[in-house]
Amino acid sequence: MTAMTEQDRRQLLDAEIAGVFPDTRGRFGPFGGRYIPETLIPAIERLEAGLRAHLGTADFERELADELRSWVGRPTALTHARRLGARWGAEVWLKREDLAHTGAHKINNAIGQALLAKRLGARRVVAETGAGQHGVASAAACARVGLPCTVYMGALDMERQAPNVGRMRLLGAQVVPVTEGDRTLRAAVDEALRDWVADPLGTYYLLGSAIGPHPYPYLVRQLQTIIGREARAQMLAAAGGLPDALIACVGGGSNSIGLFHPFLADAAVEIIGIEAGGHGRALGEHSATLALGRPGILQGAYSMLLQDPDGQIQETHSISAGLDYPGVGPEHALLQAVGRVRYEVASDDEALAAVKECCENEGILPALESAHALAGARRWAAAHPGKRILIGLSGRGDKDMPTLQRTLIADIEAGRA
Ligand SMILES: *Cc1c(COP(=O)(O)O)cnc(C)c1O
C-alpha cells in the first residue's frame, strides 16, 4: 500500500461515513476486494446478486426482525455498570451480546445468512468454525430454518473445544474434522470453500466474521450493525447522550464493526478496537493483526495480516480462541488507515484479570474475548477520568470454563486470590 496523504485520509473517511464502501469492486478504499480462484467466481457472484435482491427489502427485513426478536431475544440489554464505573472513575455501559441466543453476537449473522440461504434456494449450508462458537450459531440457525448444516472444524480445535462439538451435533449439524494444514480455523475455511466450489448452486457458505472475499465483509457488517443501532438508541435514552468512547474486541472484526459502524459519523465519539496481545509482541505470541501486522492477501481479501518477512502466514496465540486468527476484516484496515478507529492490544493476563473484575463487581461472566475490551476500557478510563464509556460485551464466558478452571478458579481454590 502506498503512503496516504492527509487529504487522501480525509477523502476516504468521508466516503466511508457516507456509506460509499464497499465500492463496486468490493473495496473499502485500498482494502478488501475479491482474491479467489476462477472456480469460485460464479458462486460468489450469485451470492452478491442474491444479497442485492433480498437484503434491505421490506419482506426480508421483516422476517429477520421477527427472528431477532422472538428467537434470538433482541434487543439485548444495555447495562449501566455502576460498580466497575466507581472503580475506574468513569461512567461505564455494557452492550450485552452475552444475552443473545447461543451466548454471543455470532447468532445475529448466522440467522441472517440462514434466512438468506433459504431465499436463494440452497439445499444445504456449509460453515467453518475455530473455537466452535460460529459452528454452534450456524447449527442452531440452520435447525431453525430447516436446512442441513455441515461444519468444518480443525481436528486440533475439535480436541480443544469438545463441548461445542457436542452442541453442534445435538443441534443436528454434521461436524467434519479437518486434518490438513494447521488443523485449525485457517484449514477449516479452505475445506469449507472446497465444499462450496463442488456445488455452488445447491450449497450456501455461511461465513462467520466480517472477513473473506466481497461481499462477505459487507454482508456480515450489515447483519451485525443491529448491535450498534440498538446501543446508540439505548444510550440516548438511558444515559442521555452518546458515549465519549466506544470499545470492542477485534478478532475477525464482526462484533466490533457491528457496534462501531452506526457511530462512525459521530466525530466526538472516540472509537477503539482491542486485539489479543497474547503474552508478547514477537510473531507467534499474539493475534494483534492491526496493531502489529502488515498488509497482504489472506482468504480472499487484501487486509492487514500477520506474516513473517517472507510473507508466510504466522501462527498466532491468544488465551481466547475467538481472537486467535492471523487476519482481520478489510473495513477495519481502512478505519485504521484513515485514523477513525485506534487499535490497541490487551494481554492474556489483562483479559483474565478483567474477567474476574467483571464477575465480582457486576455479576456477569464475560467471554475471554469480551474481557479484552473490558481491559482496554479500564486503561482508557484511567487516562480520561469521569468520561462515559460504552463497551461491547460480545459474549458470555461459560464456554471458557476449562481455561478459567486452570487459571482464575485454581487460584481461588489455592487461596492465591
Ligand atoms: C467469535 C467471537 C469474537 C471474535 O469474533 P469477531 O468477528 O471479531 O467479533 C468475539 N467475542 C466472542 C464472544 C466470540 O464468540
Image (spheres, rainbow, N blue to C red):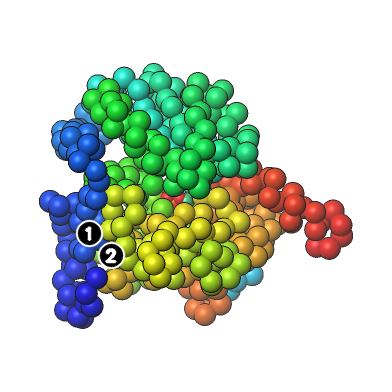
**Left or right relative to 9: residue 211:** right
In the displayed structure, would residue 240 be above or below residue 207? below
The reply to whether callout 1 and callout 2 are in contact (CB within 8 Å) is yes
Residue 188, given in percent of the width and then of the height, sits at 45, 40
According to the image, label 1 marks what residue? Answer: 28
Element class at badge 2: helix
- Say which residue appears at 57% left-offset and 32% top-offset: 165
Residue 237, given in percent of the width and then of the height, sits at 40, 54
Cβ at disc 2 under 8 Å from ligand 1: no
Indicate the amino acid at tag 2: Leu
Q: Nearer the viewer, residue 129 or 248?
A: 129
Inspect this view and state whether residue 56 appears: no
Q: Nearer the viewer, residue 59 or 162?
A: 162
- Say which residue appears at 25% left-offset and 61% top-offset: 31
Indicate the amino acid at tag 1: Phe
Q: Nearer the viewer, residue 110 or 266?
A: 110
Inspect this view and state whether residue 396 appears: yes
Earlier sequence position, callout 1 versus callout 2: 1
Residue found farthest to the front:
310
In the displayed structure, would residue 225 be above or below residue 57? below
Crowd around label 1: few <14 · some 14–19 · many ≥20 (10 Å): many
Give the quarter of the figure containing the C terminus. Answer: bottom right
Residue 266: image quadrant is bottom left
Q: CA distance from mark 1 to mark 2?
A: 6 Å
According to the image, label 2 marks what residue? Answer: 334
Element class at badge 1: strand
- Say which residue appears at 17% left-offset and 64% top-offset: 15
Q: Nearer the viewer, residue 168 or 71?
A: 168
Crowd around label 2: few <14 · some 14–19 · many ≥20 (10 Å): many
- Say which residue appears at 44% left-offset and 71% top-offset: 292
Residue 176, given in percent of the width and then of the height, sits at 49, 29
